[in-house]
Amino acid sequence: MKILIVDDHALFREGMKLILPRLDPSATLVEAGSAEAGLSHAAAKEEFDLILLDLNLPGMRGADGVRLFRQRFPTSPIAVLTGVDSAEAVRDCMQKGAQAFIPKSVNSNVMIDALREVLGGGQYFPADTGLSGKGGASAKLPRSPWKLTLRQIDVLALVSRGHSNKEIARELGMSDNTVRAHLAAIFREMGASSRTEVAALAHRHGII
């Protein structure tokens, strides 16, 4: 497993390096102290199993950073780790493509559980934002045998409706190349060779 930690506070990054081995003792942890440094890994064609992203980085504020990282890393799950804690911020981050919104005020057990949920193909956000399910539990995506990101499920849903790549790109506000990257990742993860096959599998397992 390879994880990118993007946060401008060195002390927080050091703390995460102590906590994250609980997800996978053999995980490779890559640090970036700025958005620019984090995005440079996209230019180098590096891929990550998980990106941990601070919400407010120097020169990049709010969910615009999430949008940019989503564009540059179309197949990597993004978990926002932030001191900001508001329903508006959560909604904005989810709309921009994040799979999790984790306040830095939570304890390490909650954080690890949230990240496991994301790595399992689900999503996590605080129960008190008005976005959670009944009973105050964090909202989650349907369980599936495959590790798909929230954005990949968006693409999959449109594929199942017969949309072309150009139509998907227009609907989700992404480039044709990004759509192709998502589809390639979906086909590879689901072991499918056609749009018809992935749509059938998704319906069979209740993903869409």
Image (cartoon, rainbow, N blue to C red):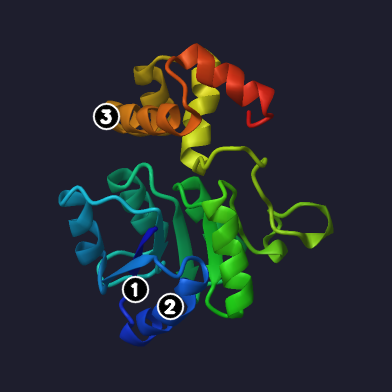
Q: Residue at x 49, y 19 (%)?
A: 159
Residue 131: image location, x then y, percent: 68, 53
What is the distance, in whole Å, between disc 3 and disc 1 at their CAs? Answer: 28 Å
Q: Which residue is mark 1?
A: 7
Amino acid at the residue labelled 1: Asp
Please give left or right for residue 71 compared with residue 161 in the image. left
Residue 3: image location, x then y, percent: 37, 62
Name the image quarter holding residue 173: top left
Count of picture labels? 3
Front disc: 2 or 1: 2
Residue situated furthest left in the rendering: 44
What is the distance, in whole Å, between disc 2 and disc 1 at their CAs? Answer: 10 Å
What is the distance, in whole Å, between disc 3 and disc 2 at their CAs? Answer: 33 Å
Q: Earlier in the sequence, mark 3 or mark 2?
A: 2
Q: Residue at x 43, y 26 (%)?
A: 187
Whether residue 4 is situated above or below residue 7 in the rendered picture: above
Q: Are marks 2 and 1 in contact (CB under 8 Å)?
A: yes
Residue closer to the observer: 202 or 163? 202
Residue situated furthest front in the rendering: 26
Q: Residue at x 25, y 70 (%)?
A: 34
Q: Which residue is mark 2?
A: 16
Amino acid at the residue labelled 2: Met
Please give left or right for residue 177 compared with residue 124 in the image. left
Mark 1 lies on a secondary structure that is loop
Please give left or right for residue 12 compared with residue 10 in the image. right
Crowding at dot 3, Cα within 10 Å, few <14 / some 14-19 / many 20+, comes out as: few
Residue closer to the observer: 198 or 12? 198
Q: Which residue is mark 3?
A: 177
Is residue 69 something one can see in this rendering?
A: yes
